[in-house]
């Protein structure tokens, strides 16, 4: 994880928030490469969940919601972690994350000092709206995006004539006052979620739950994630949320071990029943064909976008011993080790880097011209500084799947070198066919 954190900072993927002031715990900033990677992961998910499904539509609900929402959802009452502090070293722990014997003996796992009693700590960030700071002005930063979907479910049925079964997808920020925020961007106080709520007829929930488990697993396969680093974890009775009938996590083997990446939950009709009760609005679905009325069951797929960024970084990270590499027309080789991020080309922040072998003799201008052409179709980068082998290494570290090198031959016959990140293979391609070649390579990419 240290290597990934340091690469992420060095190459401008992720910076600590407010670093010049000593950093803000639980918050991170996404730099030039990081924001591209995050956006592409979000786009891949959005495409998968909306564009490829006729029965799912999108939503972008506000972060600030009516406070009754969080009473109805159960968050005001139940969204708590058990907290203990060490009286000696002041370390703070989640009681469910320290060894049970330490908890029983009230002994700090770090310094052996005495622990406080366990107390419940609500994870919602609370603030005030308007000038008065009284109980009537309390408002919460949403701890999940899902509730924005539930409160809009009727609007969407009416405006878009949706028929059950159908889904609503949303990507957005969520906030949790997490007690322990270690492991880089794994668990943070401000993060983003990609959630989809699928509304189904009550007696079809199990079938749809299994279907969504299958689809979400296939999604990661399609992204080229190492499938032996993914597994299912079913929630036991002590883990199940109060509203859930069944729940499975997709876990990923992060450097610190297996951890939750995404949850697939059968939330029953809990959410819409509660919102019916708290809002006084009838949230029953009316089946126009059969005239049946019922409160739909909800199957939820809930993934962390920022946690997916970490997963993709971990999954792509590789160090490899390689033979020295040179380019046509150049005599220089490079060192023997490379760090490479093997992103799927659809996720890579930069798709194509254009590199003139030399700055002189019009090669730089020619390279800029070729880059201008490629810009229309791909995210590009241009680099003319330093030895070509070293420039390849820089692109490997950024996870750029294709490099295009312009040399003296390009001037003669319009051919360029196309270099593939993973195999380091180099082929000559005619400039006119470059875009089609790269497109095909992206489509056919296999890790
Ligand atoms: P945990 O038990 O790890 O606190 P959770 O089970 O409460 O997580 P959910 O409420 O199911 O998590 O949230 C859905 C997804 O949102 C998680 O699978 C995870 O990817 C992401 N997520 C949740 N909390 C955080 C956080 N503090 N930082 C980053 N991502 C998070």
Image (cartoon, helix red, strand yellow):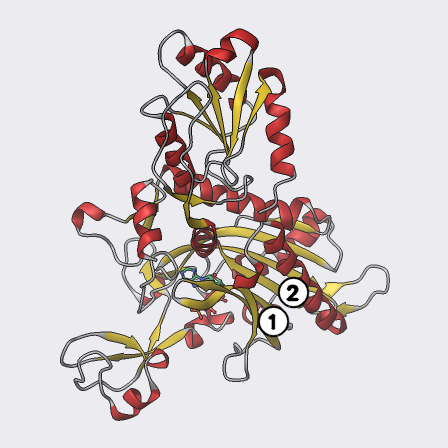
Alpha carbon of mark 1 to alpha carbon of mark 2: how far?
14 Å
Q: Nearest the camera: 386 or 4?
A: 386
**Extreme residue toward the right, this view:** 290
Q: Nearest the camera: 14 or 401?
A: 401
> Measured along the vertical axis of the image, is residue 266 above or below residue 381?
below
Label 1 lies in ligand 1 vicinity (Cβ under 8 Å): no
Which x, y percent locates residue 299? 64, 66
Q: How many marks?
A: 2
Identify the residue at image location x=32%, y=23%. 385
Which residue is labeled 1 in the image? Answer: 267
Which residue is labeled 2 in the image? Answer: 213
Looking at the rendering, in which quadrant would you find the N terminus? bottom left
From the viewer's perspective, is 285 left or right of 356?
A: right
Q: Quadrant of residue 201?
A: bottom right
> Measured along the vertical axis of the image, is residue 87 above or below residue 310?
below
Q: Quadrant of residue 82?
A: bottom left
Which quadrant of the frame does ligand 1 lie within?
bottom left
């Amino acid at each position: 994880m240290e290597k990934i954190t340091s690469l992420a900072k060095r190459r401008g993927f992720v910076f600590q928030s407010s670093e010049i002031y000593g950093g803000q715990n639980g918050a991170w900033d996404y730099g030039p490469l990081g924001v591209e990677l995050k956006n592409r992961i979000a786009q891949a998910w959005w495409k998968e969940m909306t564009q490829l499904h006729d029965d799912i539509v999108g939503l972008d609900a506000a972060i600030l919601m009516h406070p009754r929402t969080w009473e109805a959802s159960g968050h005001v009452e139940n969204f708590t972690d058990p907290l203990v502090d060490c009286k000696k070293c002041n370390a703070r722990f989640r009681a469910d994350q320290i060894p049970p014997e330490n908890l029983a003996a009230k002994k700090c796992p770090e310094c052996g000092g005495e622990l406080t009693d366990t107390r419940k700590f609500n994870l919602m960030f609370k603030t005030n709206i308007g000038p008065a700071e009284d109980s009537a002005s309390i408002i919460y930063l949403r701890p999940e995006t899902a509730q924005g979907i539930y409160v809009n479910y009727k609007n969407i049925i009416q405006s878009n004539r949706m028929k059950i079964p159908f889904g609503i997808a949303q990507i957005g920020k969520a906030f949790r006052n997490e007690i322990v925020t270690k492991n880089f961007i794994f668990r943070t106080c401000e993060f983003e979620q990609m959630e989809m709520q699928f509304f189904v007829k009550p007696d079809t929930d199990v079938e749809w739950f299994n279907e969504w488990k299958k689809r979400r697993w296939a999604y990661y396969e399609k992204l080229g994630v190492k499938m032996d680093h993914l597994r299912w974890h079913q929630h036991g009775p002590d883990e199940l949320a109060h509203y859930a009938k069944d729940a499975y996590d997709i876990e990923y083997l992060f450097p610190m071990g297996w951890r939750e990446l995404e949850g697939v939950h059968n939330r029953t009709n809990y959410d819409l029943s509660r919102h019916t009760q708290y809002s006084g609005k009838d949230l029953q679905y009316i089946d126009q064909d059969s005239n049946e009325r019922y409160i739909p069951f909800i199957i939820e797929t809930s993934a962390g976008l920022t946690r997916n960024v970490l997963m993709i970084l971990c999954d792509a990270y590789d160090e490899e011993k390689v033979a020295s590499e040179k380019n046509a027309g150049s005599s220089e080789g490079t060192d023997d080790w490379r760090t490479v991020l093997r992103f799927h080309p659809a996720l890579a922040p930069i798709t194509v880097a254009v590199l003139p072998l030399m700055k002189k003799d019009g090669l730089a201008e020619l390279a800029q011209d070729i880059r201008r052409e490629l810009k229309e179709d791909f995210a590009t980068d241009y680099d003319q500084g330093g030895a070509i082998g070293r420039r390849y290494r820089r692109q490997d570290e950024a996870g750029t799947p294709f490099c295009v090198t312009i040399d003296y031959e390009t001037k003669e016959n319009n051919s360029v070198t196309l270099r593939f990140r993973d195999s380091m293979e180099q082929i000559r391609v005619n400039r006119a066919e470059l875009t089609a070649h790269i497109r095909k390579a992206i489509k056919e990419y296999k890790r």
